[in-house]
Amino acid sequence: MDRVEQPLKLHVIPYLSDGHMIPLCDIAILFASRGHQVTIITTPSNVKTFQKSLPSHLHQYLHIHTIPFPSQEVGLPEGVENLSGIPDMDKLSRYTQAMTLLQPLIEEVVEHDPPDCIVADFMYPWVEELANKLRIPRLAFTCFSLFAICAMKSVMASSIHGGSGSFLIQGLPHPIRLNATPPMTLREGNMKEILDIQLKSHGLIVNNFSELDGEEYTEYYEKTINHKAWHIGPAYLIRKTAQEKAERGQGSTVSVHECMSWLNSKRDNSVLYISFGTISYLPNKQLYEIASALEACGHEFIWVVPEKKGKEDESEEEKENWLPKGFEERCIGKNKKGLLVKGWAPQLLILEHSAICAFLTHCGWNSIVEAAAAGVPMITWPVHGEQFYNEKLVTQVRGIGVEVGATEWSILGIFDRESVVRRESIEKAVRRLLDGGDEAKKIKQRAREFGDKAKRAAQEGGSSHRNLTALIEDLKRLRDNKF
Ligand code: UDP
């Protein structure tokens, strides 16, 4: 640990969704590992999710301030305090209402005991005003790649009219062509306002290593968009032991031991890992297509299917009606081709296992940076949000993945989708990467190189390590010059 004479005092405010909270807690650990005092402000059931995963040797630096979640006020069931537990539109609007009610509670905590700096998720734009009032810097944490933000800003500045079809994003360092038109919500309205207010913050913290976004996009963000960005990831690499990695997030529904011994029984570079993250629930007909493609390819796989908690109108029969007849008997089990995880999987450990050869991913940013850091090439299948931009970074810009050909851009992953990606397209993409050949070899080689770069970035002297040091120095200067 670095010597620090006067540690910084930081308040960290994660957005209540696993994909935002998990990396921001890792970032809290990063600051604590440098000897700074960090307080994470969150609600009771979210504390339960991450508390056990905070390294015990850092307990003197990591604190938690719990505020009540307004479950009764908005009519959400007790304990549903995270977007990842929200199954439908009705509960989504209640959750959004709850998030608004949390604002004064968080403000009160921060105002009562002001820190030297607030590190808040960019989805809380109101923190800007709070930080100004207290005359302290606010760092905006984004759970997107910087590449995606640059692309979004460019799309927001140009006039795209609805409809489908492909189009070219103007003005980026690479000619990026999207095969799906971003929905209005990602071009105007709330997201535009959030990104505009993000630009007023002291700077942006990115859970990526600068080599993956690339110098050209850091420069584009800093010079063209005119805002400072610090790449300090992949933040999860602060977790060194298998236990620290396994304990991150909701907690595995499959026994970690069972999962690892299944993988240990497989050849190196032979297993496809499939996961759509924490809020993308595919309809049964889509799951059926995936299962059919997997069976047709004949490759080994670990497939994670998240549980849709709290969805009352789905019968038991419906819940199980998404696999071809006899699929589990034929494919799933100890000496068979597949492992099916219904719920939460130890993703970091899976990705780092030598048996894994590729990751079929929904392109959530955390999943991409975790795969890149593990040196695992990707089959990209974006679903919603900024994931269609992330896909292009992986496939068109860095060449570490192939596309499945998804073109339907949902507003959020929890909504049922109109069309499906057909089994033939899935099979084709899987074969392209797993059946071998020159193209696959090159993609795998590049992915391995990014894995090495990620690990070097996080080590002492590496780019992310240096960026964190520079950021800390900057914050100390601001604190010490305050009068
Ligand atoms: N994750 C996990 N096990 C699971 C599902 C997700 O560990 O079964 C973790 C994953 O490693 C990542 C995060 O949850 O850190 C999901 O974030 P991402 O940005 O990939 O997707 P989102 O869920 O936000 O769409």
Image (cartoon, rainbow, N blue to C red):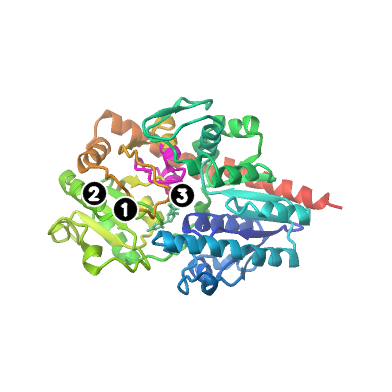
Residue under the image location 60 percent in, 65 percent down: 101
Q: Is residue 476 left or right of residue 313?
A: right
Residue under the image location 41 percent in, 66 percent down: 251
Residue under the image location 57 percent in, 58 percent down: 14
The amino acid beneath tag 1 is Leu
Q: Bounds of the magenta span?
A: 364-391
Label 3's element? helix
Residue 382 in magenta stretch = yes
Q: Nearer the viewer, mark 3 or mark 1?
A: 1
| Residue 264 at x, y percent in the picture | 27, 56
Q: Is mark 2 within 8 Å of ligand 1?
A: no
The amino acid beneath tag 2 is Ile
| Residue 308 at x, y percent in the picture | 35, 63
Q: Earlier in the sequence, mark 3 or mark 1?
A: 1
Mark 3 crowdedness (10 Å alpha carbons): few <14, some 14-19, many ≥20: many
Mark 1 crowdedness (10 Å alpha carbons): few <14, some 14-19, many ≥20: some
Q: Quadrant of residue 181?
A: top left
Q: Which residue is mark 2?
A: 290
Q: Quadrant of residue 69?
A: bottom right
Q: Earlier in the sequence, mark 1 or mark 2?
A: 1
Q: Residue 282: give its label.
A: 1
Q: Is mark 3 within 8 Å of ligand 1?
A: yes
The amino acid beneath tag 3 is Asn
| Contact, mark 1 vs mark 2 (Cβ under 8 Å) | yes
